[in-house]
Amino acid sequence: MSAAVNVLDLRDADQDVTVLVSDDPGSVLLDDDLYAKFLKKLTSEVAAFEPDLSTATSRKKITSEAFRITRFKTSIDEAGKKLNEDARKQINAVDAKRRTVKADLEALADEARRPLTKWEEQEAARVDYCKAILKAIEDCGNGLIGGEPQPFGVLFRELDEKIVINAELGEFEDQARVAHRIAKDKLTAAFEAHKRAEADRMELEKLRAGKEERDRAEADRLEKERIAKEASEREAREKAEYAENVKRQAEAAERAQKEAADRERRAVEAARLEAEQKAQAAIAKAEAETRAVREEAERAEQQRQAIARREQQEREARERDREHRGKLMGEAKAALMAQGAGESTAKKIVLAIIAGEIPHVKMEF
């Protein structure tokens, strides 16, 4: 600016502008009015000159004037280069200082935020612990501890004694109590279904044992009948040897006895078939009821898993949206801070934009 002031002083003194530019070529680069006067001066001089190409003096004058203008061009260009070099040196010095200031203030900002950072880390650990408790409760309801299936007694002890729900869970306490109640109900229902299935199995085994006992009794009866038949035949043969009359009587008695035995055998066989059919019908009914209980339990489990998957997907979607919004808001705040706004001011501006309090400005998520 000192050069510009000198230019104004000399111009006001009616000095030749070409003399000023010769002394300070860079002045026309910093003063548009001076450059306009300088260009106008040279243009008027060129226009005022009337060459006579027939004379060597006139031709020499043309060459001299063109060379003088070229020298102005060269000196002004060199002065511009010098100004650029000086500006670059100043810019480099400012950039170096900016880097130092940025590193110092970032370190100081980290130190200032250290208590909050430490609290955030502790809070994240607490939230992870609470989520682990919720996961353990849900696993117990699904029959698992540590990802492994466990007996019902162990699962009930885990829910009732080892998993503690208290105020330390903070905002997760109510959710944990609801999850505990759901898990306890599911585990109780599964246990009742297991007991019913076990009772059905024992009843089925009892029916099978009864059938086996009846089969053994029938086999014993048939064996006794065979022995009795053989004894009767043997006795009949002995009587036949003594007399024909006794033989005829024995044969008649044998036929009568055989017919009675046949009738009795047919009656026993009919009773046996009827008992076996009833036993098979009872077994089929028990098996059908067992299948129905198992299928109902499987349907209930599938419905629970579908609900759990939907709830998990909804939680993950909400978490991704929250992280996405937080990231965009953080980037917007950082951009405002990079423009010179303080952290608190930048945060208020971002919140005001999201709330729609700044006309014609909005944030897309």
Image (tube, rainbow, N blue to C red):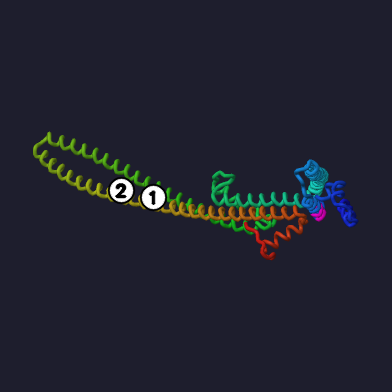
Residue type, label 2: Glu
Q: Nearer the viewer, residue 310 or 128?
A: 310
Residue underneath mark 2: 276
**Mark 2 secondary-structure assignment:** helix
* Residue 38 in the figure: left or right of residue 303: right
**Mark 1 secondary-structure assignment:** helix
Q: Can residue 73 be seen here?
A: no
Residue 21 location, x and y as percent?
85, 48
Which one is earlier in the sequence, the residue at label 2 or at label 1?
2
- Say few, some or many: other residues with alpha carbon within 10 Å of mark 2 (under 14 / 14 to 19 / 20 or more): some
* Quadrant in which the C terminus appears: bottom right
Mark 2–mark 1 distance (CA, rounded to whole Å): 16 Å
Report the magenta residues as a range: 33-38
Q: Residue at x 87, y 46 (%)?
A: 23
* Residue 163 in the figure: left or right of residue 110: left
Q: Residue 287 carries which label?
A: 1
Residue 238 location, x and y as percent?
16, 35
Residue 173 location, x and y as percent?
65, 57
- Say few, some or many: other residues with alpha carbon within 10 Å of mark 1 (under 14 / 14 to 19 / 20 or more): some
